[in-house]
Image (cartoon, coloured by chain):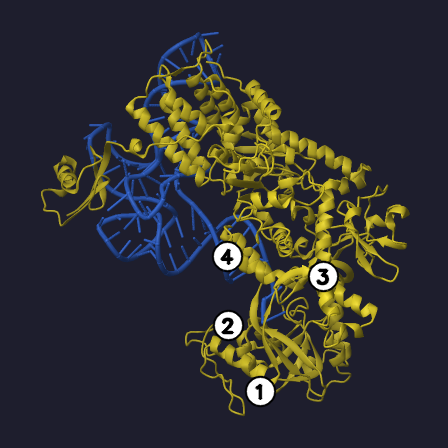
Chain colours: A yellow, B blue
RNA sequence: GCCGGGAUGGCGAAAUUGGUAGACGCGACGGACUCAAAAUCCGUUGUCCGCAAGGACGUGGGGGUUCGAGUCCCCCUCCCGGUACCA
């Protein structure tokens, strides 16, 4: 028997799908739109089209969503299933720098190649809705959304974004004032600064991550823990720069709280909660001795304030200069006098701290610091406590200053030991406790003031409440909430991104580009190189600084403005693309409201599938933008993605030479269980398939060898969609054989005649067919595609050897398999005499009565061990089941005539006998 | 350290509520067809003892609950992912 070659079938059906617009879906208002059907919006995270093309690990999620999209069509849904390209970003620009090829050309070429590969997978996208974030027709609206952010402020009373015009109106009408001053009392520039400080998009001088090698600043999210750029692994320096920021921090609470309303993996929710990092606690003000000033600290443990025996400021804290003494106080301990004066000690320490890399700060956590010579007063104990500067306190969190409580904090304990500071326990550790700092629960101790106020005996939570009350009553602080989340640094100095649509006026005022002037198109420039340098003190100059002068200057109503030259980060385009698919031809609005209301429904995107690597970045940013649009009435749901699913990575064997470098896996040979590359031995490891491990497998090769339906089936059969799974090329033949066998079951090899009969199936086959429909349907609903395929294997195997396939079974087989192997099933569907695509066929139904077995195998256990299996009627009752069990010779051999102590009957599954 | 997920044959895995552990597939072994190979078809395949009938063991390790545990509870080990001087 020859292997059947499906390539002609696959080519034919892909051509017909395209010609007939099989996967196009209408919007409300379109002539073909059927409003009676429920909607299902199933979305893939769109790819960045790299020059390397796709490997077989990429489409695993796309195939999963495609199967579900096809299943939902067959169960009577209007299915929106689009695909596009996230095409701004560094690689195209770096390629441009190396070769002079404009990023647009590179991007268009890569997009075309990606689309070709994706189409070859037979994915049922509505390609008429495709988009690329780099299309001016698309980024016009990205810029428009930025303008909405710029023209909005966050109204704390409404806990929502509102148009900035409303704020200005309220100020002008006197309904609001600025720090007690009437709006009219403010100068024009004061008014402008105040409004600028309220906008959701604003310029601010902030400490940023400046990467000289990339010539741009980076978001916190783009910098690794050891202080290097996630892209390219270049050093990143902290320095203050004036940059565009988005006020995401105003949404911190809603971004946390609304996680409760969406069906996402718990791990992703946890990552977002941790990233936002909400902590409840208190700010406490410590008066500085001999000065009217106070140091404000944030603590989650205000109940331990009686144990605060010293204070620490971050090296960058603005109060450091003001409080550092010029001479050591007389009672300064000798080890604290690390220089001639406190000023010299602090200056030296700050210099050393600034020189330390992030890596050193985190790797060697030895506590270091310097005494300022100044003292603060603990407002509870009224004790004099020394003020130190130390780099274990970070300027970026809380207030950049802490009260140190060594008794209850491990870091403070370490520092106190190193510097000989007092340690007072204010929480009673359990008797068995042997450690140093005790961070657990327990009654408060040593926490009584001279005036009688006391926390002693209270647990941690009641003590917190009581102390916050005291702090508020006595003007030393209040209960507060602090977040780790910072505002989103939104400007980049790169070329290949959306220009920020802002104009700078001659007096420093800023206006957004009028909507009718959008998009602000990227101008042509000849030299794409970032002003890269290894000098951390070099200044970032936007690439658009090299744009023609005519582009940079804009005249509006007789005033000449200069354009903002920064561009947006890569995340911008992916923040709203799921909305544009709904209505991507619209040049009046970013999305038609009626179409948006229909497709986003009440849960937004019904299923969003992608890699877990976007757990915080893309998914947090997109939720933020969506909420702003929601507040402004532009979209109808509070959350964009009602259900999120993370597909598992595809792993593959990778090979390292003796230097540890990866060698191309496809060129490695195996001999006697050992591996060789160019004749030299290499070692095998396993890892995520991709360029970095040089272990990518090209889908083009797999399709050429086995056909695309085989590839689709194999990717689903490997294992659960959300698990990571190793790719094993050898295993593909299993699914290939399945399709070959299926074809031979349906089509006579010699005559090409259809082997389908009108005869009824045998009772066994009828039952198996109903059972298969039932289990595959439930597997579809649960996205258990691996077991669905296995059930179809079983049904197919049962057809081998039949003279002809009963049409009932043949029909069910083709419909059930169509979402997985659409090309073969379209062909069989046509040959079975159907008009039109199987895509439009109805999903088969089953009769619950037909799946019930009449005879089943009942297990008999004696003392918990299986001793016999008896065929019994499925309807058998307790007494008959027990009788049948006791009658078994094998069972009697183990009960040895002893009267059973206990018999548990669960017919028809099991009878359990205890002797 | 903390948070989340996981560990089942030679390999990928299955077992939806505690009820026949290993469905389905790969590989391996034996056979049919063939000059031969590929392809295809049939059979065997958790481990150990046994000619067999049969028996013992078996879901990372240890303990527990139960007539019965991969599944529930307690303790431990290892692997993967995230995060980390966050006060």
**Nearer the observer, A89 or A153:** A153
* Left or right, residue A36 beside residue A358: left
Q: Is label 1 on the same chain as label 3? A: yes
Image: A99 above or below A475: above
Foreground: disc 4 or disc 3: 3
Q: What is the spatial separation of the Cα atoms under label 2 and label 1, in whole angstroms?
A: 21 Å
Residue A846 image offset from top left, x and y in percent: 36, 32
Residue A164 badge = 3
- The front one of A314 and A195 is A195
Q: Is residue A166 left or right of residue A619?
A: right
Q: What is the quadrant of residue A49 in the picture?
A: top right
Q: Nearer the viewer, residue A580 or B51?
A: A580
On residue A260, the disc is 4
Q: Which of marks 1 and 3 is in front?
A: 3
Q: Residues within 10 Å of mark 1 (few under 14, many from 20)?
A: some
Say which label, 2 or 3, has the lower sequence index: 3
Mark 1, secondary structure of its residue: loop
Residue A858 horizontal/vertical position (percent): 22, 37
Chain letter behind tag 2: A
Residue that label 1 marks: A381
Residue A633 position in % (x across, y down):
63, 54
């Amino acid at each position: 028997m020859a292997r059947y070659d499906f390539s002609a079938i696959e080519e034919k059906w892909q051509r017909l799908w395209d010609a007939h617009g099989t996967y196009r879906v209408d919007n409300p208002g379109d002539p073909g739109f059927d409003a009676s059907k429920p909607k299902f919006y199933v979305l893939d995270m769109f790819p960045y089209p790299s020059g390397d093309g796709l490997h077989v690990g990429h489409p695993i999620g796309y195939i999963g969503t495609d199967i579900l999209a096809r299943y939902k069509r067959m169960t009577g849904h209007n299915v929106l299933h689009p695909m596009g390209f996230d095409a701004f970003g560094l690689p195209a620009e770096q390629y441009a720098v190396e070769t002079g090829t404009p990023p647009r050309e590179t991007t268009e070429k890569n997009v075309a190649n990606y689309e070709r590969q994706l189409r070859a997978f037979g994915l049922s996208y509505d390609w008429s809705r495709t988009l690329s974030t780099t299309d001016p027709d698309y980024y016009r609206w990205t810029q428009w959304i930025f303008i909405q952010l710029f023209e909005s402020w966050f109204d704390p009373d409404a806990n929502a974004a509102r148009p900035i015009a409303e704020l200005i109106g309220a100020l002008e009408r006197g309904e609001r004032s600025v720090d007690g001053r009437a709006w009219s009392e403010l100068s024009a520039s004061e008014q402008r600064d105040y409004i600028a400080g309220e906008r959701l998009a604003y310029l601010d001088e902030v400490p940023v991550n400046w990467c000289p090698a990339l010539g741009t600043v980076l978001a916190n999210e783009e910098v690794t823990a050891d202080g290097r750029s996630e892209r390219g692994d270049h050093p990143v320096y902290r320095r203050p720069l004036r940059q565009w920021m988005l006020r995401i921090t105003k949404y911190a609470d809603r971004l946390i709280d609304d996680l409760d309303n969406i069906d996402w993996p718990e791990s992703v929710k946890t990552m977002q909660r941790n990233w936002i990092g909400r902590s409840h606690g208190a700010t406490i003000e410590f008066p500085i001795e001999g000065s009217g000033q106070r140091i404000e600290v944030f603590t989650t443990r205000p109940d331990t304030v009686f144990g605060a025996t010293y204070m620490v400021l971050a090296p960058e804290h603005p109060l450091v200069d003001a409080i550092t003494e010029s001479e050591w106080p007389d009672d300064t301990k000798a080890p604290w006098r690390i220089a001639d004066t406190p000023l010299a000690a602090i200056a030296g320490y700050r210099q050393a701290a600034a020189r330390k890399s992030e890596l050193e700060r985190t790797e060697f956590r030895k506590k270091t610091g310097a005494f300022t010579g100044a003292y603060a007063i603990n407002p509870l104990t009224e004790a004099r406590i020394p003020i130190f500067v130390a780099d274990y306190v970070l300027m970026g969190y809380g207030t950049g200053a802490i009260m140190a409580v060594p008794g209850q904090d491990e870091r403070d304990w370490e520092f106190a030991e190193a510097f000989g500071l007092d340690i007072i326990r204010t929480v009673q550790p359990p008797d068995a406790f042997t450690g140093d700092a005790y961070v657990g629960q327990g009654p408060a101790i040593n926490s009584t003031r001279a005036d009688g106020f006391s926390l002693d005996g209270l647990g941690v939570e009641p003590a917190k409440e009581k102390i916050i009350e005291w702090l508020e009553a006595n003007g030393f602080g209040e209960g507060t909430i602090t977040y780790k989340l910072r505002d989103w640094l939104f400007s980049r100095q790169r070329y290949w991104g959306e220009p920020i649509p802002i104009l700078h006026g001659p007096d420093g005022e800023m206006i957004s580009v009028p909507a009718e002037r959008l998009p602000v198109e990227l101008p042509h420039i000849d030299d794409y190189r970032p002003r890269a340098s290894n000098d951390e003190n070099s200044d970032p100059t936007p690439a658009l600084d090299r744009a023609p002068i005519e582009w940079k200057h804009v005249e509006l109503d007789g005033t000449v403005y200069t354009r903002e030259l920064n561009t947006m980060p890569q995340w911008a385009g992916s923040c709203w693309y799921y909305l544009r698919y709904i209505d991507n031809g619209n040049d009046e609005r970013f999305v038609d409201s009626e179409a948006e209301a229909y497709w986003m429904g009440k849960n937004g995107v019904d299923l969003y599938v992608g890699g877990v690597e976007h757990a915080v970045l893309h998914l947090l940013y997109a939720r933020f933008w969506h909420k702003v649009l929601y507040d402004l009435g532009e979209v109808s749901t509070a959350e964009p993605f009602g259900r999120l699913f993370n597909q598992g990575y595809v792993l593959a064997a990778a090979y390292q030479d003796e230097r540890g470098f990866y060698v191309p896996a496809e060129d490695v040979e195996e001999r006697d269980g050992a591996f060789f590359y160019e004749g030299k031995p290499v070692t095998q490891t396993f890892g995520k398939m991709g360029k970095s491990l040089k272990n990518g497998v090209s889908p083009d090769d797999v399709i050429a060898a086995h056909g695309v339906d085989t590839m689709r089936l194999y990717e689903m059969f490997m294992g659960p969609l959300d698990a990571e799974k190793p790719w094993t090329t050898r295993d593909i033949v299993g699914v290939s054989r399945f399709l070959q066998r299926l074809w031979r079951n349906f089509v006579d090899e010699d005559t090409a005649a259809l082997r389908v009969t009108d005869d009824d199936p045998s009772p066994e086959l009828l039952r198996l067919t109903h059972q298969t429909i039932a289990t595959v349907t439930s597997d579809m609903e649960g996205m258990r595609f691996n077991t669905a395929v296995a059930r179809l294997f079983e049904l197919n195997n049962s057809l081998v050897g039949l003279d002809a396939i009963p049409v009932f079974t043949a029909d069910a087989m083709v419909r059930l398999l169509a979402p997985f192997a659409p090309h073969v099933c379209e062909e069989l569907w046509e040959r079975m005499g159907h008009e039109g695509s199987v895509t439009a066929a109805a999903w088969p139904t089953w009769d619950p009565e037909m799946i019930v077995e009449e005879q089943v195998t009942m297990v008999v256990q004696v003392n918990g061990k299986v001793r016999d299996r008896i065929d019994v009627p499925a309807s058998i009752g307790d007494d008959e089941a027990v009788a049948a069990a006791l009658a078994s010779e094998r069972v009697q051999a183990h009960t040895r005539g002893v009267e059973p102590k206990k018999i548990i009957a669960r017919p028809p599954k099991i009878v359990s006998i205890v002797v």
